[in-house]
Image (cartoon, grey):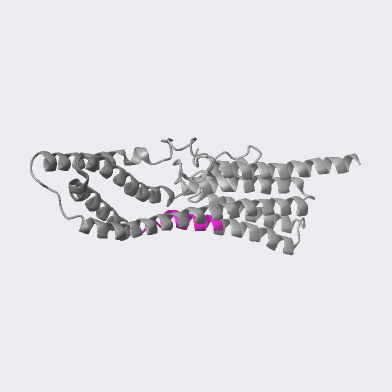
């Protein structure tokens, strides 16, 4: 399950955690830098001097830090934008369910059909963002032919939204809702589709290749040559110093990679399954409330 829950006030509970901390992704890069540092230190201390003037690394390090900060900020902007779009999906599914429950109460079957497809929509969006063409666990109460048509559609989430719009139109034709109410509910569907499109834009627009490749080349050159700049002042301490510096710099770059596409199943991705289940629970609650209210009215 993506997104690790933790207490930000408790350092001891997560300071030594491996899961989600990028250590596994970085270990081979850090090991390579450490081996280069060990070889440089061994040769410089026991054979011939191989150290270089550290001024160049000092200057490059300052500019490299700025590039890494920009990289991480750009990735976090995408992460936060993705979370905001899913917040919009949560809010608009609630609005749609609320309106359907109030305005379509005269045709409970049609209202429940709309609510069930509304609950399916976020799951369909999640799978589209993960490159899987399915609507996921569709309720058994939905028409089987509609479920099959959506599952075989090129874009299942868009197909779900289309069915939702057809149900709203059907409610207007049956005079269950007015034209004004149709426009209002359909506007919620439009906002859902807009949020889905924004998520697809985030997913399909990575950090520009030129920026990414230049930053990585600069990191490799800087860290692979850093031991030669540290070996004179640090001596044998060059080995742990190089390992720590490489862990910090490679880690910052890897965090940017981890969070720039937040819709997958990595440890630090958005908890989309949890969000989808929350939406389904909210909609089931609305549907159950309508049923209980109807029963109470009948008893009275």
Residue 181 in sight? yes
251 or 286, which is in the foreground? Answer: 251
Which range is magenta?
A: 195-208
Quadrant position of residue 7: top right
Name the residue nearer the viewer: 225 or 212. 225
In the image, is 131 to the left or to the right of 137? left
Furthest toward the front, the residue is: 233
Q: Residue furthest left?
A: 48
As drawn, 158 above or below 27: below
Indicate left or right for 135 with 93 as reference: left
Q: Could you tell me residue 6's position as x and y percent?
A: 52, 39
In the image, residue 106 lies at what x, y percent? 80, 50
Q: Is residue 122 magenta?
A: no
Which residue is most to the right?
300
Left or right position of 157 against 246 = right
Q: Nearer the viewer, residue 283 or 79?
A: 79
Please state, as top left, top right, bottom left or bottom right, where the C terminus lies in the image. top right
Is 203 within the magenta?
A: yes
The residue depicted at 62 percent of the width and 50 percent of the height is 90
In the figure, is residue 218 to the left or right of 175? left
Secondary structure mostly seen in magenta is: helix
Q: Is residue 32 visible?
A: no
Q: Position of residue 256 (x, y in %)?
A: 39, 51
Picture mark count: 0
96 or 235, nearer to the observer: 235
Query: x, y percentage for residue 136?
Result: 54, 40
Residue under the image location 29 percent in, 46 percent down = 246
């Amino acid at each position: 399950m993506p997104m690790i829950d933790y207490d930000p006030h408790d350092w001891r509970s997560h300071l030594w955690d491996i899961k989600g901390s990028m250590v596994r992704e970085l270990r081979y890069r850090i090991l390579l830098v450490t081996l280069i540092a060990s070889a440089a230190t061994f040769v410089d201390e026991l054979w011939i001097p191989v150290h270089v003037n550290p001024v160049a690394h000092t200057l490059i390090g300052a500019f490299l830090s700025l590039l890494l900060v920009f990289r991480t900020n750009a990735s976090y902007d995408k992460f936060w934008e993705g979370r905001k779009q899913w917040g919009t999906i949560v809010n608009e599914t609630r609005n749609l369910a609320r309106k359907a429950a109030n305005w379509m109460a005269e045709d409970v079957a049609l209202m429940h059909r709309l609510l069930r497809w509304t609950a399916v929509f976020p799951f369909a969006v999640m799978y589209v963002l993960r490159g899987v063409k399915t609507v996921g666990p569709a309720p058994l109460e939905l028409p089987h032919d509609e479920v099959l048509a959506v599952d075989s559609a090129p874009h299942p989430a868009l197909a779900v939204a289309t069915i939702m719009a057809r149900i709203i139109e059907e409610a207007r034709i049956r005079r269950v809702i007015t034209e004004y109410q149709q426009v209002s509910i359909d506007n919620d569907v439009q906002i859902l589709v807009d949020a889905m499109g924004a998520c697809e834009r985030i997913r399909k627009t990575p950090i520009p290749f030129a920026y990414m490749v230049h930053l990585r080349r600069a990191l490799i050159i800087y860290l692979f040559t850093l031991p030669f700049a540290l070996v004179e002042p640090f001596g044998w301490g060059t080995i742990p110093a190089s390992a720590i510096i490489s862990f910090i710099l490679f880690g910052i770059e890897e965090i940017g990679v981890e969070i720039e596409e937040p819709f997958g199943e990595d440890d630090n991705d958005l908890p989309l399954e949890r969000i989808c289940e929350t939406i389904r629970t909210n909609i089931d609650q609305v549907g159950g409330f309508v049923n209980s209210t109807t029963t109470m009215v009948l008893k009275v």
